[in-house]
Image (tube, rainbow, N blue to C red):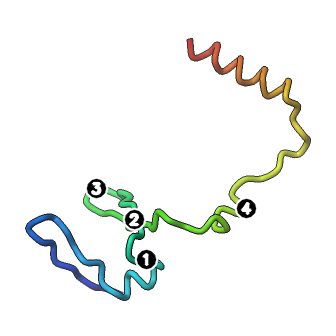
Amino acid sequence: MMTTATMTTKGQITIPAPIRAALGLEAGSRIEFIEIQKGQFAIIPATSPVLALKGMLHMPEKPITIEAMNQAIAAQAAKAR
């Protein structure tokens, strides 16, 4: 699909209806512009449902204790100094 839009003198564009529908955008939706390569950008909806995050993080193989977390935090803090 290839559609075009025209920019106003204020730098605003109207995203064509087929693109809004494909991205699930509504009035008030936020979008992000991600540079793919020099001169090319992707438009990404910035308001995704929480369920879209499911599966991004995996459970550790074994539980980590609070003490181990505190030690790791202290070690990283010491490196930063």
- Residue 15 image position (x, y, % from top left): 30, 78
- Secondary structure category for the residue under label 1: loop
The answer to whether mark 1 and mark 2 are in CB contact below 8 A is yes
> To which residue does mark 3 refer?
38
State which quadrant residue 80 falls in. top right
> To which residue does mark 2 refer?
31
18 displayed left or right of 8: right
The answer to whether mark 1 and mark 3 are in CB contact below 8 A is no
- Secondary structure category for the residue under label 4: loop
- Residue 44 image position (x, y, % from top left): 43, 66
> To which residue does mark 4 refer?
55
Q: Type of residue at label 1?
A: Leu
Q: CA distance from mark 1 to mark 4?
A: 23 Å
Q: Which tag, 3 or 4, sits closer to the chain's start? A: 3
Q: Which tag, 1 or 3, sits closer to the chain's start? A: 1
Please give the name of the residue rendered at 63% of the width and 67% of the height, measured from the top-left corner.
52
Disc 2 versus disc 3: nearer the observer: 2
25 displayed left or right of 10: right
- Residue 40 image position (x, y, % from top left): 30, 63
Q: Which tag, 2 or 4, sits closer to the chain's start? A: 2
Disc 1 versus disc 3: nearer the observer: 1
Q: Which tag, 2 or 3, sits closer to the chain's start? A: 2
Q: Type of residue at label 4?
A: Gly
> To which residue does mark 1 refer?
25
